[in-house]
Amino acid sequence: MSGASDGILRAFLGYDMKRAFAAIQADVNAALGPLGLRMLTFSVLAMVRDNPAIRQSHLAEVLMIERPNLVLILDELEGADLLTRVRARDDRRAFELTVTLKGRRLCDKALAAVSAHDARMAMGLSDAERDALQGALRRIERNGRGSQDARQVSRP
Amino acid sequence: MSGASDGILRAFLGYDMKRAFAAIQADVNAALGPLGLRMLTFSVLAMVRDNPAIRQSHLAEVLMIERPNLVLILDELEGADLLTRVRARDDRRAFELTVTLKGRRLCDKALAAVSAHDARMAMGLSDAERDALQGALRRIERNGRGSQDARQVSRP
DNA sequence: TATTGTTATACTCTATAACTATA
DNA sequence: TATAGTTATAGAGTATAACAATA
């Protein structure tokens, strides 16, 4: 027998989650690589496609990406002609983001690839188990927001 | 109304998982910070404590950390007098890792802090829901191993 | 030859401060 | 003065190649 085990750490949600997420990230990036996308660039592209004329600040807020980091992702996607930045008419500080035709076509392929990846990773889970999993994940996300507030309140 | 939503991405496991994991990581790092630890250094310290005389290669394999990256983590923990590297008598290439008394005491505190964090993040989940969640996460991790093998086989 | 630990390096993701141009 | 986007920069975490010592 090989001896060591990670049994202690398996008691914690965070450990199981880190390993499951690492598996998901590796798999989705392998699926998106041939399309020139990664998990992060895909999520931005899909969001812009689904929310035409969304502004950078708003997009950053929804995806919980810091604005300076989003700039680089958009540079990459705009440089690949997948989306456009157009000055907002009512506020000349802001840009409105819209996917190009090329971006829409790539997004279609990416959505298919990510759906296949998703089904692969959820293999063996019933619909009910999968729903319960996503419900639990969203619950954890909300619980985290609660304790984040508590941390900020505790040092004003 | 504010308009944009991340509804499309919410269909995917990976998106919920990324956000839940980000919440967990932020919370556990906030809990461990006062002890001078992070998620990664804590997991190494707890593993060494639970597996005295474990060797670096073996530890790296179990925790799925690349050996070069583990070296830096061990430098940090050894520098803080939390564990020791001792040459193995039967193989003078290898080091045996063991926590010091100081390391054991800090690990006790850290385990308490991480347990409290874990309970906070799982708030609102019944025991059965929590068990189902961890079962699903391990299933996903295994599914990922399967498709990783497939990727490697497909380009030999 | 192969393995253990190490060094050096690079890439991705994340986080913050400070700037510009508009409002 | 405040906000939108940007620049520059720094820190984690992760990944690979190449080396010395030992097997």
Image (spheres, coloured by chain):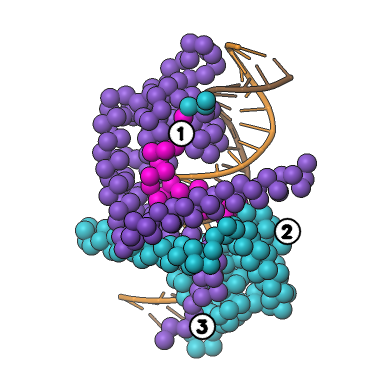
Chain colours: A purple, B cyan, C orange, D brown
Q: What is the x, y in percent for residue A13?
A: 53, 63
Q: Which residue is mark 1?
A: B5
Which residue position is annotated with label 3?
Answer: B92
The residues tagged by marks 2 and 3 sit, at their Cα atoms, a distance apart of 37 Å
Residue B132 image-quadrant placement: bottom left
Residue type indicated by callout 1: Ser
Q: Quadrant of the C terminus of chain A?
A: top right
Quick one: quadrant of the N terminus of chain A? bottom left
Per the image, the residue denoted by label 2 is B34
Residue at 44%, 52% in the rendered image? A134
First in residue order: circle 1 vs circle 2: 1
Residue at left offset 47%, top offset 83%: A3
Residue B20: give x, y in percent of width and height: 51, 51
Describe residue B34's horizontal placement relative to residue B88 as left or right. Answer: right
* Mark in the foreground, 2 or 3: 2
In the image, residue D13 above or below residue B8: below
Of the numbered discs 2 and 3, the one sitting upstream in the chain is 2
Q: Are marks 1 and 2 on the same chain?
A: yes
Left or right, B134 with reference to C15 = left
Q: Nearer the viewer, residue A51 or A129?
A: A129
Total marks shown come to: 3
